[in-house]
Image (cartoon, rainbow, N blue to C red):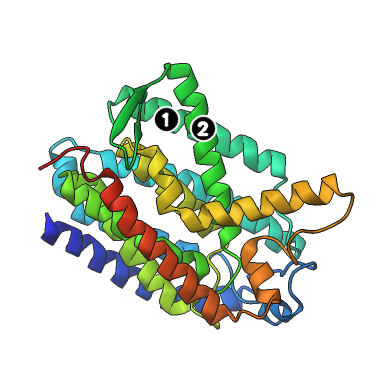
Amino acid sequence: MILKLLTAFILSLGVTIVAGLILVPFLRRMKAGQSIREDGPVWHRSKQGTPTMGGLMFIAGITVACLIAGYDEMRSGQFGHIFVLVFALIYAAIGFFDDYEKLLKKRNLGLTALQKFLLQLVAAIVFVLLMRLLGYLTPNLYIPFINVTILIPEPVYFIFAAFVIVATVNAVNVTDGVDGLVTGVSIPVAVCFSAIAFLWSRVYLGVFAAALCGGLVGFLLFNFHPARIFMGDTGSLFLGGAVCAMAFSLDIPLIIVPLGIIYVIEILSDVIQISYFKLTKGKRLFKMAPLHHHLEMSGWSEYRLFFVFTLISAAFAVLSFFSVSLRYPA
């Protein structure tokens, strides 16, 4: 199994790098540049025009790796990694339409919030129902750390699942605001899922997780500060969908809380800021939300943000692995 995971990693890494070498100059020629938020940090305006939709690079790498490294599983009738991939691709398509709208309008506004929410909600419900019918998940809610499973009614579970998926996808999207940030913090997440899949002999998920890790490492070569390309909503929604699909496919959705701790903190800072602003009629708790912008305005460099947040993510990835390792003891 280790060889298969390594193959998926290397394939995804290689294809992503090659795709980047082609895609970056192509997007520059097409003038597919990112429009920067008018209310964002002033120094971010220098990023105006940096190519976006770079998520297509690692999406290509992951897809190729899943089809090649996961070929034996498909021959034996195991398509779990393909279901996970397709679900993430659906979210990537939503992100692509959003990015495309932004490029057409030449400003940082794409699909409306309601349009994105409804599309994401429908995709989440369909995925959860499909995975339940195929036996990849149960309405038994596993609680990490205390190794306890709680049986809940299926309708309640589906509502819970849809909420978790939509919230997580948007949390990942919000985290993508500094060069390399969401890429860096997501690599330990992918490594953790690879380790869990290996521990539980879930080859199909291991292939996808290893491919995701390889794709992100390859993308980071282009996305590290100063970024030559941004992943755009195409990439961040794919990434959010991938994280959710892996967690639910392993039937451990609550692992998202500790494993995706940076995503959780980022989205909470946004929610708290908006709520506080409304309650106090115009006052702000943070200098700017989400948290990474507050820290930037407090003097943190993009390098510091990347390394501190990535190290926190790595520490919680180790913790998360051990939090579920006793579910199926060897």
Does residue 255 appear anywhere in the picture?
A: yes
Q: Is 189 on the left or on the right of 173, as rendered? A: left
**Total numbered badges shown on the rendered structure:** 2
Badge 1: residue crowd in 10 Å (few <14, some 14–19, many ≥20): many
Residue under pointer 2: 162
Residue extending farthest to the front is 146
Vertical order, 245 against 181 (above or below): above
Amino acid at pointer 1: Val
- Residue at the (69%, 55%) spot, across then down: 101
Ranked by sequence position, the earlier of labels 2 and 1 is 1
Q: In this view, does 196 lie to the left or right of 173?
A: left
Question: In 3D space, how far apart are the residues under numbered discs 2 and 1 (Cα atoms)?
Answer: 8 Å
Q: Look at 12% across and 61% down and name the residue there.
A: 3
Q: Quadrant of the C terminus?
A: top left
What is the x, y in percent for residue 36? 72, 70
Q: Please determine whether, in this image, residue 18 is positioned above or below residue 168.
A: below
Q: Which mark is residue 128?
A: 1
Q: Do the residues labelled 2 and 1 touch (CB within 8 Å)?
A: yes
Relative image position of residue 26 (x, y in whole percent): 53, 75
Measured from the top left, where is residue 209 in percent x and y? 30, 54
